[in-house]
Amino acid sequence: MTKVRYSKDADALLIELSDKKIDYADDKGNIIIHYTSENEPVILEIFDAKDFILNSLSSMIKEKEIIM
């Protein structure tokens, strides 16, 4: 059921992990995580998404080189 949407205007990435009822949200800087009352993540909102993704990919590439 995972849905991913990107808003170019807001540079925000919205990742819906389930359709369960949201009980609360936790702000982690440019990421907001919405949880159920059982602490299951329901939605991830990532702001400044382009920078977040580029920095994440860059970190992954620098972490370990795969030799085949």
Image (cartoon, rainbow, N blue to C red):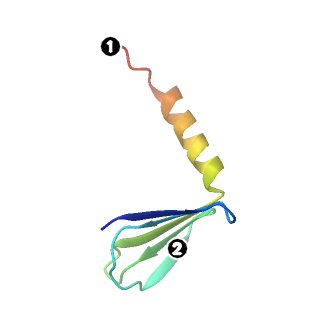
Quadrant in the picture for the N terminus: bottom left
Q: Could you say where residue 34 lies in the image, as x and y percent from the top left? A: 46, 75
Type of amino acid under label 1 = Met
| Label 1 with label 2: CB-CB less than 8 Å | no
Compared across the picture, whether 1 is left or right of 59 comes to: left
Name the mark nearer the viewer: 1 or 2: 1
Q: Could you say where residue 9 lies in the image, as x and y percent from the top left? A: 69, 64
Front-lying residue, 12 or 55:
12
Name, please, the residue furthest toward the right.
9
Tag 1 secondary structure = loop
Within 10 Å of disc 2 (Cα), the crowding (few <14, some 14-19, many 20+) is few
Going from N to C along the chain, the mark reached first, 1 or 2, is 2
Front-lying residue, 4 or 18:
4
Residue occupying image coordinates x 63% and y 50%: 50
Above or below for 56 versus 68: below
Residue occupying image coordinates x 36% and y 68%: 17
Q: Rounded to the nearest whole Å, what is the CA distance between mark 1 and mark 2?
A: 41 Å
Above or below for 24 versus 50: below
Quadrant in the picture for the C terminus: top left
Q: Provide the residue designation for mark 2.
A: 26
Q: Could you say where residue 18 lies in the image, as x and y percent from the top left? A: 33, 73
Compared across the picture, whether 57 is left or right of 12 comes to: left
Above or below for 50 versus 16: above
Compared across the picture, whether 6 is left or right of 51 comes to: left
Q: Which mark is residue 68?
A: 1
Q: Image quadrant of residue 32?
A: bottom right
